[in-house]
Amino acid sequence: MIMRSNAVPNVFLSGGSSPYLGERDRLRYLPDLTVDAVKVLCGNRYEHFEANTETTVIDDRELRVFEWTRCTYVAE
C-alpha cells in the first residue's frame, strides 16, 4: 500500500520500536481506509501495521489507528 506523506494525514501508526519512524512519521495518508494492513519501509526493514477499531485525535483531526505487528527485513 502506497502512503503519500504530503497529503492530509488520516491514519496514525502506533507501536513498534523502529528508530527510523519518528512521531511525525507516524501520521500518514491512506487513499483507501478499508485496507486491513500496511507496511512502511524504514531503513533496511519493513514495519508492518494492522488496522484496529480505534481512532485517535491529533491536531484536532480524528485518525484511524494501525497497530504495529512485526518487522521484516529487505532481502539483498
Image (tube, grey):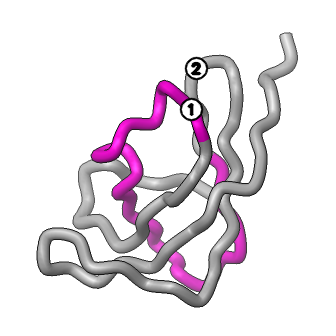
Q: Decide: few, some or many residues near mark 1? Use Cα within 10 Å; few <14, some 14-19, many ≥20.
A: few
Which label belongs to residue 18? 1
Image coordinates for residue 15, horizontal then vertical, percent: 56, 53
Image coordinates for residue 54, horizontal then vertical, percent: 51, 85
Image coordinates for residue 53, horizontal then vertical, percent: 59, 89
Q: In this figure, which residue is indicated by the disc labeled 2?
A: 43
**Label 2 secondary element:** loop
Marks 2 & 1, CB-CB < 8 Å contact: yes
Q: Residue, x 26% and y 60% (percent of image)?
A: 7
On screen, 50 above or below 38? below
Q: Residue, x 38% and y 63% (percent of image)?
A: 29
Q: Is residue 71 left or right of residue 55?
A: right
Please identify the dominant SS of the magenta region.
Answer: loop
The answer to which of marks 2 and 1 sits earlier in the sequence is: 1
Give, as a single range, the part of the protein colored magenta.
17-39
Q: Residue, x 27% and y 79% (percent of image)?
A: 57
Q: Residue, x 80% and y 26% (percent of image)?
A: 73
Distance (Cα) linking label 2 and label 1: 9 Å
On screen, 45 above or below 53? above
